[in-house]
Amino acid sequence: MSHQHSHPQSMAGKNFANAQLAGKDFRGVDLRGANFAGADLRNANLELADLAGANLVNAELAKANLAWATLAGASLNDADLSGACLREARLNGAILENAILDDADLGSASLRGADLSGASLKDACLDGAWLEGVTGLNS
């Protein structure tokens, strides 16, 4: 049997570049290494999704739900995450250069080793966030 039942929601490595995915439900989906460059994911539900190593460069993620998502090593350069929920998200080693995180909720998120060079964090919540080894964070 070629049917894989252990990961029925696996979309790892898929190409969603420039796709219109606003409001879509990707809750708990395996999206490791997927390409979302330039994709519209506004108000999308990515709670508990695995986006490790994913390409989210220039993606539109305003008001998206990324609570408890794994974004370790993901590329989020120039992404718009304004008003997004990233509570308890794992962003270890993620690249967020020039990303917009205004009004984003990063409470208790792990940003260990992440690159926030040029990122905007106006009114962002970082309560309890893990910031060891973060670069580009202006205090």
Image (spheres, rainbow, N blue to C red):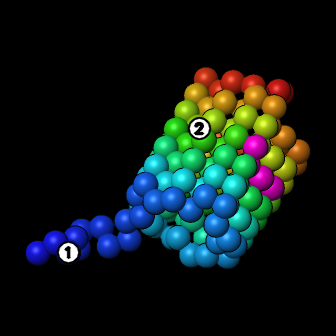
Image quarter of residue 13:
bottom left
Image coordinates for residue 105, horizontal then vertical, percent = 73, 54
Residue 47 placed where, x, y %?
Answer: 55, 65
Tell me: 78 left or right of 15. right
* Label located before the other in sequence (2 or 1): 1
Q: Residue at x 74, y 59 (%)?
A: 60
Residue 77 in sight from this viewpoint: yes
Whether residue 108 can be seen here: no
Residue under label 2, please give it: 94
Please name the amino acid that badge 2 sits on: Ala
Coordinates of residue 138 in the picture (x, y in percent): 82, 27
Residue identifier under label 1: 3
How many dots with numbers? 2
The quadrant the N terminus occupies is bottom left
Question: Which residue is rendered at x = 49% and y = 44% of the image?
Answer: 53
**Residue 35 to residue 48: above or below:** above
Quarter of the view holding residue 75: top right
Region of the chain picked out in magenta, as a range: 78-82
Quadrant, the C terminus: top right
State yes or no: residue 106 in magenta: no
Q: Residue at x 70, y 40 (%)?
A: 77
Residue 99, percent from left and from top: 76, 43
> Mark 2, residues whose alpha carbon is within 10 Å: few (<14), some, or many (≥20)?
many
Tell me the kind of residue under disc 1.
His
